Image (spheres, helix red, strand yellow):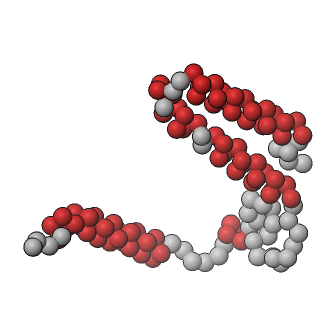
């Protein structure tokens, strides 16, 4: 009865090298980076709030709206990749179904644009 060692040796070697390399990169980045806080680190982030402020402060609902719209349109656009890969082998029904989906996606985007959901005041 032979062991499984020779069959799994390349996998073990790959994982060992990957873990070693990840440890080296992590260790070097920790050693070479600065740990002092400066004005840039303590400045306000993209949301416009102070980084170290009261966590119970009210948050503008427009941030949530933009995030939800981004997720909705981003996830729907992700359906384009498998469709584009199999486009040459699809029937006319598959083509027109995705065309209708893209039309509905565009109508939804224009609707949100006209309602002002994408405007920042």
- Residue 88 can be seen in this image: yes
Residue at image x 54%, y 38%?
81
Placement of 98 over or under 40, stated as above or below? above
Residue at image x 47%, y 75%?
30
Q: Is 95 on the left or on the right of 48, as rendered?
A: left
Placement of 40 over or under 37, stated as above or below? above
Residue 10 percent across, percent down from the top left: 22, 63
Instruction: Looking at this view, name the residue that lies furthest to the top.
Output: 92
**Residue placed most toward the observer, 26 or 76:** 76
Give the quarter of the image for residue 8.
Answer: bottom left
Count how many numbered circles sit on residues in the image: 0
**Residue placed most toward the observer, 109 or 90:** 90
Q: Is 72 on the left or on the right of 21, as rendered?
A: right
Residue at image x 74%, y 67%?
43
Q: Is 61 on the left or on the right of 81, as rendered?
A: right
Residue 64 percent across, percent down from the top left: 80, 57
**Residue placed most toward the observer, 3 or 69:** 3
């Amino acid at each position: 009865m032979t062991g499984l060692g020779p069959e799994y040796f390349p996998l073990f070697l790959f994982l060992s090298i990957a873990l070693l390399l990840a440890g080296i990169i992590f260790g070097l980045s920790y050693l070479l980076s600065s740990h002092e806080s400066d004005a840039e680190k303590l400045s306000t982030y993209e949301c416009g709030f102070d980084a170290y402020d009261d966590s119970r402060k009210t948050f503008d609902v427009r941030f949530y709206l933009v995030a939800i719209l981004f997720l909705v349109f981003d996830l729907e656009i992700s359906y384009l990749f498998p469709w584009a890969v199999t486009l040459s082998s699809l029937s006319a029904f598959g083509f027109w179904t995705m065309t209708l989906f893209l039309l509905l996606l565009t109508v939804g985007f224009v609707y949100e644009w006209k309602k002002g959901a994408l405007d920042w005041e």
